[in-house]
Each structure stands twice: as C-alpha cells, then as structure tokens.
Image (cartoon, rainbow, N blue to C red):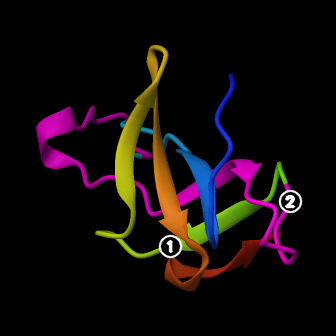
Amino acid sequence: MNFQPLGNRVLVKRVEESNTTASGIIIPDSATEKPSSGEVVAVSKEVSVLENGNVVLFGKYSGTEVSVGVEKFLVLDVDDIFGIIG
C-alpha cells in the first residue's frame, strides 16, 4: 500500500468486532454500529505520538472513509483520537 497521510493525520483500519453474541445469536450488519477502534497503518511525518501497529480509540463519527485498493480505511486527525489501547 502506498499512502502517506499529510499534516496531523493517520490512516487507520477499523478493528472488526464479532457479530455473534455470547449465546450464539448472529447480529446482522444492518443492526451493528461501526467499531470505534482501529489499528494505525500509516502515520504522517508530523505525528510523533503514534506509530504503525498502535490500536487506537476514536469517535464514532470521526474521520473520512477512503478506499485504498480494495480495502477501506479511515483518515483521522490526531485530535480525533482519544487514546491508545493496550
């Protein structure tokens, strides 16, 4: 993948959550919310607090969804990221 974010931005791939409950009930895609966490896959040169591989938590409606090749990613401003998980 050749994508380099500019400014104070990072490229994030959403972490897919399970669509089955603990009791085995399958939840359809139309009834689930988009996950609000993801893995950082590219960081601009201006961002020093994040690196590739970090799992971050961000707002539900944050960022801009983009397609790079066949995959979908989010371009997030660093200010939209709440923190690093783990």
Q: Describe the element under mark 1 as helix, strand or loop.
A: strand
Q: Which residue is mark 2?
A: 51
Q: Which residue is mark 1?
A: 58
| Left or right: 66 in relation to 10 | left
Image: magenta residue range: 22-51
| Left or right: 12 in relation to 70 | right
Residue in the image at 66% along x and 66% along y: 56
Where 3 sits versus 80, above or below? above
Report the quarter where the C terminus lies.
bottom right
Position of residue 8 measured from the top left corner of the image (x, y, whole percent): 63, 73
| Left or right: 70 in relation to 43 | left
Position of residue 71 measured from the top left corner of the image (x, y, whole percent): 48, 23
Q: Main secondary structure of the magenta part?
A: loop
Mark 2: which amino acid?
Answer: Glu
Q: Describe the element under mark 2 as helix, strand or loop.
A: loop
Q: Residues within 10 Å of mark 1 (few under 14, many from 20)?
A: many
Q: Residues within 10 Å of mark 2 (few under 14, many from 20)?
A: some
Residue at the farthest left position: 30
Pick whichever, 45 or 58, lies toward us.
Answer: 45
